[in-house]
Amino acid sequence: MLYDVCMFGYIEAEGENVISFKEKPDVKTANEYIKAKKYFWNSGMFVFKVETFLDELNNFSNNIYTASQEAFKNCEINNNIINLSESYMSKIPADSIDYAVMEKTKKLKMIVLNTDWSDLGSFEALYNISNSDADGNVSAPKNVFFNSKNNLVISKNKPVTFIDVDDLIVVNTDDAVLISKRGSSHKIKEMIAELEKVSPNITK
């Protein structure tokens, strides 16, 4: 639970009425939200009419709306398959639906869903559903651990060895190596922005 509570954004609400969005907090703040009984995990599931969403996108993030319209206007349609141009798509500003619209619109209600939930969009969630060894390490057999616990390792080729380290996420690919503390992988988006400054083609 220590990692899970800060891996989600929160919605502050009274009944079905949304008061505010709270981005991924630190553990202390997240636990305060839970105790307050009026904050809910933001699962990121939205239901809306297309025209309503586009109107709100135009109102609050016109740059995204305009660039998206241009990409659609310049698409190719063959056998009812829409092929969007990469050059036009790359001009659409990168932003989440939360930031672009949901945190700004007044046309918003919330429905509470009382169920188990796992967001497999994070490395922490992947760790939680994976089989681990006796020391809590999730890894392929080729990797080696000395006095190291609760680590997640994803490595395509080279074996990875650990000495006296706990609670790490290590992802080793052909292009780059990610090393993160478990509980901090939600910062990957910020990290990619910095990585692109030094290696512009790495995420292409």
Image (tube, helix red, strand yellow):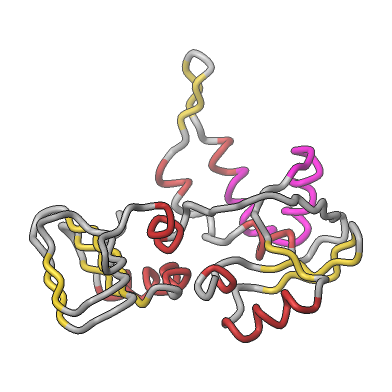
The relative height of residue 143 versus residue 181 in the rendered view (above or below) is above
- Please name the residue shown 74% across and 64% down the image: 40
Residue interval drawn in magenta: 47-69
- Please name the residue shown 75% across and 50% down the image: 113
Q: Position of residue 76 (x, y in %)?
A: 48, 26
Q: Is residue 56 magenta?
A: yes
What secondary structure is the stretch in magenta mostly built from? helix
- The answer to which image quadrant residue 49 occupies is top right
Q: In this rendering, would 93 be left or right of 185?
A: right
Q: In this rendering, would 156 be left or right of 79?
A: left
Please state the total of marks drawn on the protein image. 0
Front residue of 117/16: it is: 117
Front residue of 79/106: it is: 106
Q: Position of residue 161 (x, y in %)?
A: 12, 71
- Please name the residue shown 82% across and 71% down the image: 38
In which quadrant is the N terminus drawn? bottom right
- Please name the residue shown 57% across and 73% down the image: 6
The relative height of residue 159 versus residue 187 in the rendered view (above or below) is above
Q: In this rendering, would 27 be left or right of 184?
A: right
Q: Is residue 146 magenta?
A: no
Q: Residue furthest top?
A: 79
Front residue of 12/65: it is: 12
In which quadrant is the C terminus drawn? bottom left
Front residue of 17/148: it is: 148
The relative height of residue 52 versus residue 2 in the rendered view (above or below) is above
Q: Residue furthest front?
A: 134
Q: Position of residue 80 (x, y in %)?
A: 53, 17
- The answer to which image quadrant residue 98 occupies is bottom right
Q: Position of residue 110 (x, y in %)?
A: 82, 55
